[in-house]
Image (cartoon, rainbow, N blue to C red):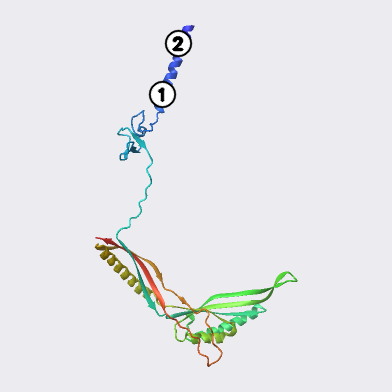
Amino acid sequence: MFGKRLLILIALLGTLALGAACTQAVGSTPTPGGISPATGLPGGGTGQPVIGAPADGGSSQQFTGSSPSSGYTTFAPQSQSYGTQQSGIWVSGSGRVVVTPDLALLSLAVQSRAKTVQQARDQAATAMDQVMTVLTKNGIQKKDIQTQYFNIQPEYVWNDFAKRQEITGYVVTNSISVKARDMEGLGVLVDKVADAGGDLVRVNNISFTTEDPDKYSAQAREAAVKDAMAKAQQFAKLTGVTLGKLVYIAETGSNVPIVRDYAEAKMLTAGAAAPPTPISPGEIDVTISVQAVFGIE
């Protein structure tokens, strides 16, 4: 009986020893030095790339698990950003063309108030019809007259006794935009419009621009390119290098302004002896900006 128990104990110890040996072989992990005890390869012999740096501070190498080596520690390399390196000669150029405006933009309106919508609308319609008649008789084509805004709005007053708002009347507003090309007769035209519309007329704004802005933009663009090239040549001369070919050019800005100086034009309608309203278009600047890059030979 004792011998039988001894054999069972020996078999059990043998089984435990065999299980421990298998667990150590399968679960082995690489040492901090990067070499797996099980395979003797960097990264545990898995075949995966390992970025390593020698422990003695030498140059970094990449391992694939095919060449065993000792003394390497794994690390995460710092992220480096390589932006576009600016090389060559970078310059900007600007061109400017002074233009005498040949187109006036008028913002006109009539506004009426009355107790009822019908009365306010009729008054506004009559005044606007008279304004339109004056415009067409003075050379303004119908295609150059455009309705911009029409509104019927009630007016309220607070009834303190009833504690509520009450409608007291209605306001009708009708505004138009007009293109006028006769710069010299512009003041006379404005005065005639004011006479036609009477107290209901409103001159909201008069602005100036040019009929063909593309033509002047092309001239300003040519001047901007010449300015950029002259700057590049000067840079090359000052720095003792040879200017290379143009490698990049782009338009970075443009301005074809509409000058607004007459939003409060005063109407002089006191009588025939009064001079016409003085309105001067002045001058406007058309500007173009470019950026150019030249190589260095």
The reply to whether dot 1 and dot 2 touch (C-beta < 8 Å) is no
Name the residue type under label 1: Cys
Q: Mark 1: which secondary structure?
A: helix
Relative horizontal placement of residue 79, taking residue 295 as reference (left or right): right
Q: CA distance from mark 1 to mark 2?
A: 23 Å
- Residue at the bottom extreme of this rendering: 273
Relative horizontal placement of residue 6, taking residue 289 as reference (left or right): right
Q: Position of residue 236 (x, y in %)?
A: 27, 64
Could one spot residue 286 in this view of the protein? yes
The residue indicated by pointer 1 is 22
The residue sitting at 40% across, 22% down in the picture is 21
Q: Is residue 138 above or below residue 107?
A: below
Q: Is residue 8 above or below residue 281?
A: above
Q: Position of residue 100 (x, y in %)?
A: 40, 80
Check residue 7 in the rendering and tell me which mark sits there, or answer none.
2
- Residue at the right extreme of this rendering: 161
- Residue at the top extreme of this rendering: 1
Q: Position of residue 35 (x, y in %)?
A: 35, 32
Q: Mark 2: which secondary structure?
A: helix
Q: Position of residue 279 (x, y in %)?
A: 48, 84
Relative horizontal placement of residue 16, taking residue 42 as reference (left or right): right
Q: Nearer the viewer, residue 89 or 36?
A: 89
The tag earlier along the polypeptide, 1 or 2, is 2
Q: Is residue 208 above or below residue 246?
A: below
The residue sitting at 56% across, 83% down in the picture is 129
Q: Is residue 5 above or below residue 34?
A: above
Instruction: Give the quadrant of residue 257.
Output: bottom left
Total numbered badges shown on the rendered structure: 2
**Mark 2 Cα-neighbour bin, 10 Å: few <14, some 14–19, many ≥20:** few
Instruction: Give the quadrant of residue 229.
Output: bottom left
**Mark 1 Cα-neighbour bin, 10 Å: few <14, some 14–19, many ≥20:** few
